Every structure is written in C-alpha cells, then in structure tokens.
Image: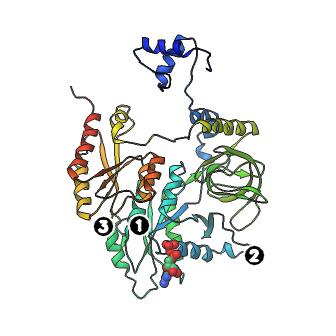
Amino acid sequence: SKINISVTEIITHLIKLGIMASINQEIDFDTAEVIASELDIKVELENVEEEVHSILEEYEDEDDEKDLMKRPPVITVMGHVDHGKTSLLDAIRHTSVTSREAGGITQHIGAYTVQINNESITFIDTPGHEAFTAMRLRGAQITDIAILVVAADDGVMPQTVEAINHAKAAKVPIIVAINKIDKESANPDRVLQELTEHGLIAEAWGGDTICVPVSAHTGEGIDTLLEMILLSAEMLELKANPKRLAKGSVVEAQLDKGRGAVATLLINTGTLRIGDIVVSGTTYGKVRAMVNDKGKRLKSAGPSAPVEIIGLSEVPEAGDEFYVVKDDKTARQVSEMRKHYLKDQQVKKSAPLSLDDLYNQIQEGAVKDINIVIKADGQGSVEALKQSLFKLTNDEVRVNVIHDGVGAISESDVLLASASNGIIIGFNVRPGANVSKIAEKEAVDIRLYRVIYDAIEDVEAAMKGMLDPEF
Ligand code: GDP
C-alpha cells in the first residue's frame, strides 16, 4: 500500500522469481530489493545504529598521543552473597579522607571516588557480577579491575566462581580481597588454596594474582587493598583525553519528581561541562546541573569521574553509552532516529550465537570461538562434558567453556552467555523460574540434554558444518 502497487502484481513478480508467496507471507530484504528494483523503487534496510554511528563518527576521532593523560581506574566489587561486598564498599568509602572533608555529605549516586596517595580510584556502588554483566550487555565495559571478595571463614563458593568467570569473560583483571580476617574462624590459606583450582594463583604462591587480607569491619588491610589497586592500574596504563567532548556510560538513572530525569554518568574520556548537550539512547538534553558523590556542585568533570546530572529529557538506561555532541540538532537527530526505529522493533546489539547458525556465522568469519556455559546435575558430568568439548577445538574454531557449575541454569548464566555471544548446555538440569523468559528476550540458545554424547555430537555437527571446505 505504501508504494501503491497491487498485491497481485507483487505476487506475480515473486512467482517469476520462483517464490510462491501468499498475501500475508513475509519476504526477506534481498527478495524485496530485487522486486523493488524491477518496479523502480529504492528500498533501504533500516539499520539505525549504523546511521547513528555515521553521525557520531566525528566524536570517535583518535586521540593525539600528547593529549592522553593518566585516568583513575574504575572498580567493580564482586563475590558470593554475604561475603561482604557491600560492607567493603562502605568501609572503603569511609576510610577515604575526602568523604570526611568539610561540608561533604556522601550521596549515593551509584559510584564514588576515593583518594589515596593523591590518586583517585572510582568504585561502582552496585556490587555483583550480574550488574557487571548486565551493563556489559548494553555495551558498557566500564570496569578496569574487578575486586573479588571472598570471606576467609567461608572460602570459594558458587557465586565466587561465577564472579571469576564473568570477570574473565570480560577480560578484566581480578584482585582478591580475602575478607572477614577479624573472625576467629578465618582461614585465608584455605581461600588461597581453593582459588588455585580456578586459575587464580596468589603472588605469595608464585602466581600473579594479588590477594589482600582485609576486614571490612575493623578496616584492616583496606589501605593496602587500595594501594594494590593503584599498582595494578599503573600497569594497565589507563589513559584518556580530557581535552575532547565527553563520552562514557550511564551508571544509574531515575525520575525525580522535582528535578526530572536524574542520571549518574561515568566519564570514560573527555571533559563534561555544564551546558553540554548529552545524548544517550533515545534521550538527550543539556546538562543543567552536575554534582559529584560528595554532593559538591561541579562546573566540569574529567575522565573516570562519576557525576550526577540533570537536564535530560527522559530517563536513560543504565549501561547505555552517552556522548556529548556539538549541538542540539545532532542530539535530536540521533534521539529521533532511535525512537523511530524502536517503535518498530527492539534494538538488538548483535545477533547472539545459536548452534543452528554457527555454520553461517563462521562462513562470514564472524565466529572463531564457541563460548559455552555448562550446567549439570553433578560435578562428574560437568567435568566429562568439559573435557569432551575442549577436545573439539581444531585449527579453525576454538571451543571455550567460559563457565561451568552444578545446578539449575540461572539468570547469571544467561547474562554471561549473552554478553559473551555464547550458548548454554544443560545436562539433566533446566532453566530456573523466569530464566527461560530472559533467555528468550536475550535470544540465548539453551540446549538441554540427558545424554552427554548427544551434547557433544550436536556441537561437533555444528562445527563440522563450519569447517572450511578442504580440497
Ligand atoms: P554482601 O552480600 O556480599 O554484600 O555482604 P554484606 O556486606 O551484606 O555482609 C554480609 C554479612 O557479613 C553482614 O552481616 C556483615 O556485617 C558481615 N561482614 C562483612 N564484612 C565483615 C568483616 O570484615 N568481618 C566480619 N566479622 N563480618 C563482616
């Protein structure tokens, strides 16, 4: 109806192409394009992010080496429930001198900065690997170093292992904080021992993982932990260009009755100033006011600084990127393009992997690694699956088991698979309540098996299909 051509005419064209289509059948873009060109009509595939990218491209310019300056590290705290993540974040906030500065009232804005030895460290205030990977899923890789909290009286637990694998999948280095050393029952050596089973070998034991004994309660070891963070950051050579327009990620956002959309932004590079035009997702606006985590009003903020701003037209999504653009028109254009597109369909960042189209993806050169999360009903099956899957690795394709564990398939598994473009193999287990829904939304391929051999065979078959033909 848009092009004012009758259905019969289009069906006739389709039949000529050998497609026996009916009136309510969908056709793919390539077919539509062929027919459109016969009818002298130009069709374009709507790929909003590509178009948006072409607009934002000028803000992606390479930095001049001489403009690059050291920036503070951004830290996320992870670990098993009750091992003291929240307590540690609180303890760190309170040991910092700056939070006790006159007039400084700590604000919970989703991230905070502490100072030690005249250097800054930024902490993300939402602990846990789920939050970390959820942010990653939306495109934000903001964490430079992960602090893995392990309670010295409890040792490595299932979520400790999850956290390790989430950090590894994101290629974020890990520093271990062995917490609760004030407790009678604390056994730090046992923790070190258990960590070796997951590839984290303490420096004291000849490895390269920094492990610091701490107590969130007494404050013992916290300064050392902060110093170790700075030391690791030094080696990462984190740099940014404060001279450019700011770019970064949304950490948190909500609607405030009086102030409108309030968003915490973490600046990745550049300097953010009052009056700047910010665009993030479908929302945009002028920065009207900006405060830091101590409630101090700011005129500008540089790389790695978390700031709370007001002035956006709507509440942005946590994990989305933000850009400062040069004028209101550009911001509106980007926002409207995305809004228009969202009306029709949800933006999917990239099509996740499924065993079924592994072959095609490899053909396109899109996949050289198969990332797999294994969940099974017993450690024996986990190991058997892992070993057999590893053996499938060949010259063309590498099979990586990015996480494995005993128990039901969880939300964390789905997030990890999605963020790592992986699939999930369940052996004698099912997805937990709600998890199937999330998997469907994220389009994560979950395969359930009762026979180990079937699982191996499926993966192998998918891989065989994608091997380059040999002559
Ligand atoms: P999270 O679930 O990892 O965020 O853990 P929390 O920070 O909520 O701590 C869980 C429990 O452990 C709380 O009762 C804390 O008071 C306690 N806890 C945390 N850190 C320490 C510590 O260093 N020493 C002792 N004795 N208890 C701690």
Mark 2 → mark 1, Cα distance in angstroms = 39 Å
Along the horizontal axis of the image, is 168 left or right of 117? Answer: left
Residue 221 seen:
no
Q: Quadrant of residue 471?
A: top left
For disc 3, the marked residue is 197
Q: Nearer the viewer, mark 1 or mark 3?
A: 1
Pinpoint residue 419: horizontal percent, then vertical percent. Answer: 45, 50
Mark 3 → mark 2, Cα distance in angstroms = 47 Å
Judged from the image, the secondary structure of the residue bearing numbered disc 3 is loop
For disc 2, the marked residue is 102
The amino acid type found where label 2 is placed reads Ala
Mark 1 → mark 3, Cα distance in angstroms = 15 Å
For disc 1, the marked residue is 159
The amino acid type found where label 1 is placed reads Gln
Along the horizontal axis of the image, is 426 left or right of 61? Answer: left
Direction bottom: furthest residue? 184
